[in-house]
Amino acid sequence: MSVEQVPVQRADFDQVMVPNYAPAAFIPVRGQGSRVWDQSGRELVDFSGGIAVNVLGHAHPALVGALTEQANKLWHVSNVFTNEPALRLAKKLVDATFADRVFFCNSGAEANEAAFKLARRVAHDLYGPDKYEIVAALNSFHGRTLFTVSVGGQPKYSDGFGPKITGITHVPFNDLDALKAAVSDKTCAVVLEPIQGEGGVLPAELEYLQGARKLCDDHKALLVFDEVQSGMGRSGHLFAYMHYGVTPDILSSAKSIGGGFPMAAMLTTEKLAKHLAVGVHGTTYGGNPLACAVGEAVIDVVNTPEVLAGVKAKHELFKARLEKIGHQYGVFSQVRGMGLLIGCVLTEAWKGKAKDFFNAAEQEGVMVLQAGPDVVRFAPSLVVEDADIEEGLNRFERAVAKLTGA
């Protein structure tokens, strides 16, 4: 039996969807590798990667195969039972990282919610109810639940929903003195993104993360790394903490971990994990067989020397060309980031106009992103072909030339 497909168009969004998004004027309908086609058959080069999600592009055969095979076996049994794909993926994540234990869920917000709850639970169990304060960075982003949006240091996302969760302090990113002043014996966790994503693709300085690690050790607090955007090969390492050589106590992963299938994970040590005893935290869909089968295929492909080395090589291709474009047209003051998470910081003359670059690029057939109003962001597939990089950046340069009237 086939499902009847009712014709839809972009205008329907404004009639039937809650207006919390303002999607582009076209509807993508098919993707292959780093190319996407819309309803009219127009082809675009995808440098947005579903906001750092489509880690292996569109319709990667390994992911399609894993999903199809699992779909014909078992979709969902709940966490009343375990399942084979979840156990296989958890083993691979444990083998590849600092972690001993994994909690699967469905989104970055859920992974961070679990991380923050675990941090407070550990402090409560070991030191009593007064050790619950969390120190996080200004302009961070950790999700949209009330807890995670309170930890994220952006009032535009957290204001207007009644009383915020208390005990959360925000300090400037990469400012170790400010962090030292904020951390005390009441601190249960310091929460940081090794690369601030939504905040403008801003990598942490090594001394800052090393200092954060020492502060946590000195004050019996936990160091939580939000690697929702920077993880699963995006930085050129499986996780960005490996680049810095600074190991967290808890790590959250989502976006790329499912390659486009909604899934996430919180990773931690055995010692800490025991504080989430039976019934303390849970999720209906987390760790379901479909998601974990896809996640296993993702890590099998990504966690290889060839792919991770390729990410670093492709970073150089992007950076060299984007710096050249930025200089020639006077639009970028800096091209920063790590691996295939790249931010082009707009010059004073173009500040606040990242959306204009997004729109101009789309008109020329290339999909890019913003990271706030002042940064144009690129988060393509980790296996984007060099020919697609060249073609996409040619289109992007045409867009910049038009935008600047050059």
Image: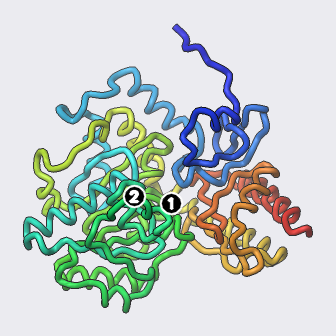
Looking at the image, do the residues carrying marks 1 and 2 touch, with CB atoms under 8 Å apart? no
Ranked by sequence position, the earlier of labels 1 and 2 is 2
Three-letter code, disc 1 = Arg
Which one is closest to the eye, mark 1 or mark 2?
Answer: 2
For image coordinates 53% across by 74% down, the residue present is 202
Q: Where is the C terminus found, in terms of image quarters?
A: bottom right
Give SS at disc 2.
Answer: loop
For image coordinates 31% across by 61% down, the residue present is 97
- Image-quadrant location for residue 193: bottom left
Does 37 appear above or below 270? above
| Pointer 2 local density, CA inside 10 Å: few below 14, some 14–19, many at least 20 | few
Does 332 appear above or below 359? below
Q: Position of residue 159 (x, y in %)?
A: 44, 64
- Judging by the rendered image, the residue that carries numbered circle 2 is 161
Residue 95 appearing in the image: no
Q: Nearer the viewer, residue 217 or 107?
A: 107
For image coordinates 68% across by 56% down, the residue present is 368
Number of on-image labels: 2
For image coordinates 38% across by 56% down, the residue present is 253
- Judging by the rendered image, the residue that carries numbered circle 1 is 234
Q: Is residue 377 left or right of residue 252?
A: right
Separation of marks 1 and 2 at Cα, in angstroms: 33 Å
Does 365 appear above or below 238? above
| Pointer 1 local density, CA inside 10 Å: few below 14, some 14–19, many at least 20 | many
- Image-quadrant location for residue 60: top right
Colouring of the image: rainbow
Residue 2 appearing in the image: yes
Q: Is residue 81 left or right of residue 204?
A: left
Q: Position of residue 71 (x, y in %)?
A: 40, 25
